[in-house]
Structure formats: structure tokens, C-alpha cells
Amino acid sequence: MSDNETASSTRRDRDLTNAQDMIVCEGVSKWFGDFQALNGVSATIKEQEVVVVLGPSGSGKSTWIRCINRLEQHQEGRIVVDGVELSNDLRNIEKVRSEVGMVFQMFNLFPHLTVRDNISLAPIWVRKKPRTEAEEQATALLERVGIPEQADKFPGQLSGGQQQRVAIARALAMEPKVMLFDEPTSALDPEMIKEVLDVMKELALSGMTMMVVTHEMGFAKEVADKIMFMEGGQIVEMGTPEHFFTNPTEERTKLFLSQIL
């Protein structure tokens, strides 16, 4: 059995019926001036669930995922992460952010710090971990993402794929309950995409709750428990990969798939 088949069967065989709700969105709306980026988005993501969000550019995918980490502020509706509602209460925002890791399209690493220091910085300053412990954790995480030999290099000495793997390790260093990925491979050369997706697949199989905005259809087929398709700031269709790729019900979904597959 191939690794892909293993990943697929492992994701689909799990019963998440009784799993805890990790992210709950109810009627979430967001405007940028007169432009409505999100229009009444409602969805629930359960603990250990892997959700892939697809859709054309401008459909609201990135805005939604950024609202879940309060990088953007929603104006209507509710967002609750692990039982904590995102409100204007800074304590709630800090609590949610402490439990949510985020990986962006661009790596956002500190160029003047080594790879090890990039990963250990937040645990030392935010979690108050002793430096030795934080650096040991950084070493273990670099092993996990497959680049332990890069620990003492600077980001500029790494390929794009290696930098993105460092960014994933940095997010994991805060021991989050949820990982959000906003098009993590879209800035990479094609040959570097697989190495990043392989790390994300391993993370999914380990039981991490994940929400992934991506255009990588193969990843969505192999790893997702649920696929959500967005258009015009709304979730147009939601279902398993089998449903989405073989029997979608909405015409907009069918058109999207006909253009990319």
C-alpha cells in the first residue's frame, strides 16, 4: 500500500461523530469598506478533523481563516475556538492565539536569526520556557519536518520549501491545538511543494486539527476529512472528498472542478 493510500484510509476510517467541536463559526460576516468579503459563514470543525477550503481567488477563503486567528476582525456572527469566543476582550484573543498556529503563503521568518532561534524564540518569550528546553524542542521539531541539518543556518541560506518547513516547525513550537494554513505552497516552486505537503500529511495523521486553504487537489483528496468550497464569501458546498470530487451537487462547484482538474 502506498503512503497516499495509507493516508487516505486513515483519514476516512475515523469516526469524528463524538469529537469535541474545536472551531465553531455562526453567521460570520466581514466587510472591507463597501465590499463584503464574508457573507454569513457557518461551519463547525471538530477536534482532529482536517478541513480543506477550496474556491476561486477572492471567494473569502483567506479572510475567513484570518478571522479565526483574529488577524482580521469579523463584524457579524460568532467565532468560538476551543470554547473561547473571539470578542473584543484581549484576554480571549490572546487565549485563542495561544492555541492556534498559523502558516502563511510567505514564510515570515526573521532573517537575522538562525533556524533554531526562529523556532525557539516564541516559546522562550511567550511560554517562558528555559532556553535549553526551547532549543531542544526546536531540534526535535526540525527532525520532525525533515531538516535537522539546517538548524544553524539563516533563512536566506534555505530553499523556499525548507523555509516553509521551518515556518511549520515554528508554529508547532507553541504546541497549538489547531493549525491554520493559508495557501502554504502557493509561493513555492513545483519541485518544493511535495516536501511541504508531506510534512502537512504527517501532521494530519498525528491527529492535529487542521484547516487548510489550498489549491492542491491531490492533498485535498488524500488527507481531508471534509472539503468546503467557497464562492462570493459563502460556503457553497461542503462534503467528503468522495462527494466533492465525484458527485458535487452545485453547478458552481462543477464549473470550478471542470476548470482545474
Image (cartoon, rainbow, N blue to C red):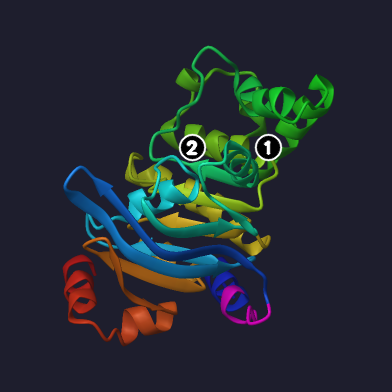
Residue on which disc 1 sits:
173
Label 2, label 1: how far apart the Cα atoms are: 14 Å
Report crowding for label 2: few under 14, some 14 to 19, many 20 or more residues within 10 A (C-alpha).
many
Q: Earlier in the sequence, mark 2 or mark 1?
A: 2
Vertical position of residue 66 compared to residue 39: above or below: above
Closer to viewer: mark 2 or mark 1? 1
Q: Report the front residue among 53 and 164.
A: 53
Callout 2 amino acid: Gln
Residue on which disc 2 sits:
164
Report crowding for label 1: few under 14, some 14 to 19, many 20 or more residues within 10 A (C-alpha).
many
Q: Where is residue 43 in the image (x, y as percent from the top left)?
A: 45, 69
| Helix, strand or loop for disc 2 | helix
**In the image, what residue occupies the spot 49% across and 47% down?**
196
The image shows a total of numbered marks equal to: 2
**In the image, what residue occupies the spot 57% across and 44% down?**
101
Q: Report the front residue among 86 and 243.
A: 86
Q: Is residue 206 magenta?
A: no
Vertical position of residue 139 compared to residue 113: above or below: below
Vertical position of residue 135 compared to residue 260: above or below: above
Which residues, given as a range, are shown in magenta?
Answer: 11-18
Q: Position of residue 226 (x, y in %)?
A: 47, 73
In the rendered image, the quadrant that contains the N terminus is: bottom right
**In the image, what residue occupies the spot 52% across and 73% down?**
225
Quadrant hosting residue 169? top right
Q: Do the residues labelled 2 and 1 touch (CB within 8 Å)?
A: no
In the rendered image, the quadrant that contains the C terminus is: bottom left
Callout 1 amino acid: Ala
Quadrant hosting residue 40? bottom left
Q: Is residue 228 visible?
A: yes
